[in-house]
Image (spheres, rainbow, N blue to C red):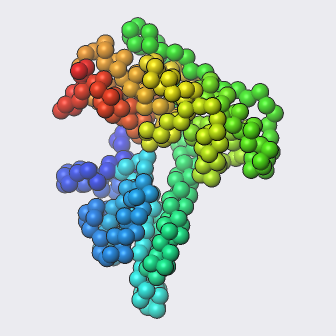
Amino acid sequence: MSSIKGDMISLSKTRAVGVRDLKLFLDYAERGVKSLAAAVTVSGLDDFESPFEEAVGKAVRDSGYEVHAQVGCSGYRIDLAVVHPNKPGKYLLGVECDGASYHSAFCARERDKLRQSVLEGLGWKLHRIWSTEWWHNPRAELAKVTQKIAQCLAEDSDQDESPEGLSTLHIEDAEQPDEAIYESLDSDIDATVAHFSEWKSSLPALPSEAFDKASSKPIIIKVIEEITAIESPVSLAQVTRRICGQFNISRATQRISASVLQLAKKAQIHIDARHQQVFFWSTANQLSDFLIFRKHSVACKRRPEDICPDEVANAAFAVLKTNISMAEEDLLRHTAQCFGFSRVGQNVAAAVQDGLNHLYTTGRAESENGKVSLP
């Protein structure tokens, strides 16, 4: 029995052999002998094999993604691997950088077809860049890579949100708020709690094709303002999903999210881009005066990644005030409970850790040797 999976362990921040072996062992326990061919080793974050690879890797990093060079082993080594932004122990996309001579090498192409099929069978998603096309138009080739990354992110999100299946129900139960958890909150903590209110549309549903029409822009801006007025601080992702529901759009794609963000810039709200996700606030003053956190019922809930780090930091500060000092692991768990999460899964842990980091950077708490205390 294990509470963690192999892809929850990141090798990018440690060279410890024991950590690497534990990751490989968990991978083997989950996937059997197939995992042996996929045993991941990272030669080095900047161990590029050519100036071409280095140029591509730097461009992808400048686009905001973490990139590892020469990942894998033996003949299955991948030139560049893009780290999943929300799951540090998992690679989102492999980028293959091929020189001009590869075009004319029939044997190499045939051999690589087999190699690619093996890697894809092991779960890798691959994107290939030719050196001639890169040097001719690097901006266009980079756009293809970032588009592929966005597509992989959307597909990964869809898998996390698949509506049916026993395994999905188990995961949802593990990371949805449990109202009974609130009953155990200390009374001093409860004094800083407010109830989360969810926006309900007063407009009739609109057809999906209406989203891109110019006549719909004022409607979308008004909806953004209404959602923000009720749910602030609210994530761009949450607002996008709400608007998709308004327009009968089945999936919140990267394109729709970008459109919502552009229209939000015309709305009477404050856009906060300090964190990994963009959040909307009613006003800039609300951001500076925000000292509470909000609990919600199972019928009216938020995903952990949709909770603003400022709000998580407020909950952590409230917990810390009642304890003065505590282990960061305990603080993380108790903070998660403030939002009704009885189990700290990967998404909950990542969201709460973002909030704790914000607590430290704002000087409201100090962390040393795994212990957190008030300054």
Q: Residue at x 33, y 61 (%)?
A: 68
Residue 215 at x, y percent in the picture:
80, 44
Q: Quadrant of the C terminus?
A: top left
Q: Residue at x 36, y 47 (%)?
A: 8
256 left or right, relative to 295:
right
Query: Residue 208, can we see it?
Result: no
Query: Residue 285, can we see it?
Result: yes
Number of labelled discs? Answer: 0
Q: Quadrant of the N terminus?
A: top left
Image quadrant of residue 359? Answer: top left
Residue 56 at x, y percent in the picture:
40, 69
Q: Residue furthest top?
A: 187
Residue 323 at x, y percent in the picture:
27, 15
185 left or right, relative to 169:
left
Image quadrant of residue 54? Answer: bottom left
Q: Residue at x 43, y 50 (%)?
A: 85
From this view, report whether residue 104 is shown above or below residue 66: below
Q: Residue at x 73, y 42 (%)?
A: 217
19 or 308: nearer the viewer: 308
361 left or right, relative to 82:
left
Residue 361 at x, y percent in the picture:
31, 32
Image quadrant of residue 325? Answer: top left
187 or 116: nearer the viewer: 187
From this view, report whether residue 225 is shown above or below residue 47: above
207 or 278: nearer the viewer: 278
